[in-house]
Amino acid sequence: MASRVCPAWVGYLLTNPLRRLFQDPYRILSPYVRPGMRVLDIGPGMGFFSLPLTEMVGPEGKVICIDIQEKMLRVLRRRAERRGLADRIETRLNNEGSLDLSDLQESIDFALAFAVVHEIPDKTRLFLGVCGALKANGKVLLVEPKAHVSEAAFQETLAIAKETCLDPQAWPQIRGSRSVLLGKRGQVGN
């Protein structure tokens, strides 16, 4: 699986309101996200899913957005400020080698990885980090675009997730995507 990071300019296309016609964030995420939750958004881009997540967790919740591109996060922060959501969203710039989630140990209720895992070179490290951050009953929605990720590549990613601490729980249907809801299994060592 080749790793290639989505260019920042594509972020503007991905936030196009017309995208909601076939990938409505509220419809996709509402089965999993509740007020007061702490949510991790991995590779949020400019916030197509992050801002709806932030609205869904409400004033008592928090959304932590981690990306490797400062420009994406800068635009996301501006969009959150314009919508009055900046106080419940946190953006973090990380390098390609690590998510650095050590301060989030067992504090995340739900993680979203939408069309991003295929861009990450070390998927084992990614999933181990997410496993450590998830609460005991935490969930991960893993979604990859069919146009970029073959069924075989998706199954390879799923096998890596299973090797860490994540087991498939459901197979949500998301247009144009391969998707799975993963649940945390037991406790992760080290």
Image: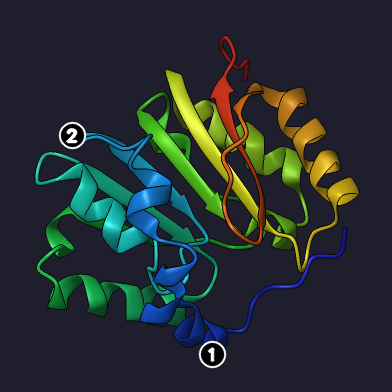
Locate the N terminus by quadrant. bottom right
Instruction: Identify whether 190 is placed above or below 95.
Output: above
Left or right: 83 as drawn, with respect to 5: left
Q: Position of residue 47 (x, y in %)?
A: 37, 68
Q: Residues within 10 Å of mark 2 (few under 14, many from 20)?
A: some
Locate the C terminus by quadrant. top right
| Color scheme of the displayed model | rainbow
Residue 9, numbered label: 1
The quarter holding residue 24 reads bottom left
Instruction: Identify whether 70 is placed above or below 115.
Output: below
CB-based contact (under 8 Å), mark 2 and mark 1:
no
Q: Position of residue 19 (x, y in %)?
A: 46, 74
Residue displayed at 78% across by 56% down: 121
The quarter holding residue 175 reads bottom right
Amino acid marked by disc 2 = Gly
Amino acid marked by disc 1 = Trp
**Residue at label 2?**
36
Instruction: Identify whether 95 is placed above or below 165.
Output: below
- Which secondary structure lies at badge 2? loop
- The residue sitting at the top extreme is 186
| CA distance separating discs 2 and 1 | 33 Å
